[in-house]
Amino acid sequence: MLQLAVATAVPDLPQFAGKGFAARLFAYPVMMLVVPGLWWLLAGRRGAGRVGERLRRAPWIAFAWIMLPFLVDVTGNTLDLYDSIGWWDDANHLVNWFFLSLGAGLLLRGGASGRPWELLVMIGGLGAVMAIGWEIGEYFAFIRGGTELDTAYQDTLGDLTLGTLGAVAAGAVVARGAVRRPRQAQ
């Protein structure tokens, strides 16, 4: 949050210029807290008990995986890695979607009753949908009317592909864990 505030307060630094940090200052905390907030509300409706009990039962590891990509993105911009390392953006779309989808997959695995391949498809599909949403957000936040419009189409196709691959990889990890988990319980 501090990095976002600095980027918004000092937008003239080259690593922040034209990258929609005013939108990120609002959107990132909201996106990071949506899943824990929904979980909190739903856990309360299911009669999860007192606040202390809900906190103890919260899936903190899944929440951390979901929140991590936002920290990685802002830190990459703060350190000017997106502009100084040519492959940084591509690596972030692959790895951050792996992290994000891994967190979502861990949450889905808890309520899934299907086969592991169904979990893989569900996580991969959810990750692809999130990647599409992300790219739409990027377009409105800083590509439309910005300096990256000439290369946006090619970049967006690459980002969607890498994000989906990261999500499918996370789905494979979660599905593999779902296969191993019942055997360990026996």
Image: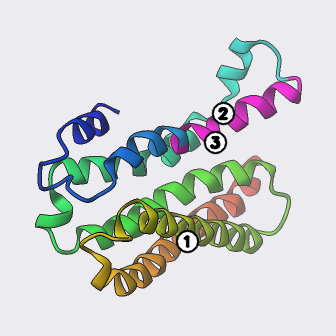
Q: Check whether the beta carbons of the residues at disc 3 and disc 1 lie within 8 A of each other.
A: no
Q: Is residue 48 above or below residue 4?
A: above
- The stretch drawn in magenta includes residue 39: yes
Mark 2 surroundings: few (<14), some (14-19) or many (≥20) residues within 10 A: few
Q: Residue 30: x, y in percent?
A: 53, 39
State the CA–CA distance, disc 3 to disc 1: 18 Å
Which residue appears at 66% of the width and 21% of the height?
Answer: 56
Q: Amino acid at mark 3?
A: Val
Q: Which mark is residue 114?
A: none
Q: Residue 58: x, y in percent?
A: 66, 30
User: Looking at this rendering, what residue extends furthest in the front direction?
Assistant: 145
Which residue appears at 62% of the width and 69% of the height?
Answer: 129
Which residue appears at 35% of the width and 80% of the height?
Answer: 152
Q: Is residue 103 left or right of residue 150?
A: right
Judging from the image, the colouring scheme is rainbow
Q: Amino acid at mark 1?
A: Ile
Q: Nearer the viewer, mark 3 or mark 1?
A: 1
Q: Is residue 28 above or below residue 39?
A: below
Dominant secondary structure of the magenta stretch? helix
State the CA–CA distance, disc 3 to disc 2: 5 Å
Chain-order first, disc 3 or disc 1: 3
Chain-order first, disc 2 or disc 1: 2
**Residue beneath disc 2:** 37
Q: Nearer the viewer, residue 30 or 163?
A: 30
Q: Amino acid at mark 2?
A: Gly
Please give the range of residues in magenta: 31-47
Q: Nearer the viewer, residue 137 or 89?
A: 137
Q: Check whether the beta carbons of the residues at disc 3 and disc 2 lie within 8 A of each other.
A: yes
Q: Which mark is residue 35?
A: 3
**Residue beneath disc 1:** 132
Q: In what element is the residue under mark 2?
A: helix
Mark 1 surroundings: few (<14), some (14-19) or many (≥20) residues within 10 A: some
